[in-house]
Amino acid sequence: MSVVNNKKFQLVKDFKFDSAHHLKGYLGQCSNVHGHTWTGKVYCEGSSDMLENNMLTDFSVIKSMIATLDHTDLNVMLDTDMPTAELIAAYILENIPYAVRVDLYESPGSKVTVTFW
Ligand SMILES: [Zn+2]
């Protein structure tokens, strides 16, 4: 019997990326193309039987997924006119194995948290 059996795991990975976006039709400065340094955390959870090679979600998988957003135009990358922090956080949540929560800071003090309902 392995020491990983009969356990629950939570891993948390900090991330950071730079990208541009604009909110088409929004009344305010966010309708102009501008950039952010987005930062946040991905939380993954699972049990022993979900591990592969004694890993729940390889940290490098999260790093690679976040890298697909780095130095992009999020309107193009996510194919939307409204790439809000909510939408970006939800996209990250949907694209990382066993992710259960994403915290995304658009700027210091402005955070979205998304989980599954
Ligand atoms: Zn913005």
Image: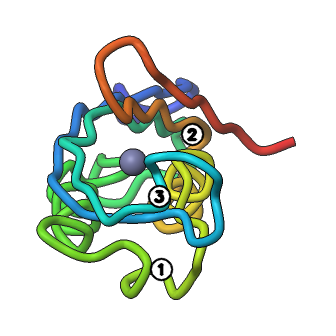
**In this rendering, would 18 be left or right of 79?**
left
> Closer to the camera, 106 or 100?
106
Q: Earlier in the sequence, mark 2 or mark 3?
A: 2
Quadrant for the C terminus in the image: top right
Label 2: few (<14), some (14–19) or many (≥20) C-alpha neighbours in 10 Å = some
**In this rendering, would 108 be left or right of 83?**
left
Quadrant for the N terminus in the image: top left
- Identify the residue at horizontal 31%, vertical 27% (top origin): 107
The percent position of residue 41, horizontal first and vertical second, equals 35, 31
Instruction: Identify whether 74 is placed above or below 1.
Output: below
Q: Quadrant of residue 14?
A: top left
- Identify the residue at horizontal 47%, vertical 30% (top origin): 103
Instruction: Identify whether 37 is placed above or below 90.
Output: above
Instruction: Give the amino acid at mark 2.
Output: Gly
Mark 1: secondary structure = loop
**Which mark is in front, 1 or 2?**
1
Q: In the displayed image of the protein, which residue is found farthest to the top? A: 109
> Closer to the camera, 112 or 15?
112
**Which residue is denoted by mark 2 in the rendering?**
46
Instruction: Give the amino acid at mark 1.
Output: Leu
**Which mark is in front, 2 or 3?**
3
- Identify the residue at horizontal 60%, vertical 67% (top origin): 82
**Which residue is denoted by mark 1 in the rendering?**
78
Alpha-carbon distance for marks 1 and 2?
Answer: 28 Å
**Which residue is denoted by mark 3 in the rendering?**
92
Q: Earlier in the sequence, mark 1 or mark 2?
A: 2
The percent position of residue 37, horizontal first and vertical second, equals 18, 42
Mark 2: secondary structure = strand
Label 3: few (<14), some (14–19) or many (≥20) C-alpha neighbours in 10 Å = many
- Identify the residue at horizontal 49%, vertical 60% (top origin): 31
Q: Earlier in the sequence, mark 1 or mark 3?
A: 1
**In this rendering, would 65 be left or right of 76?**
left
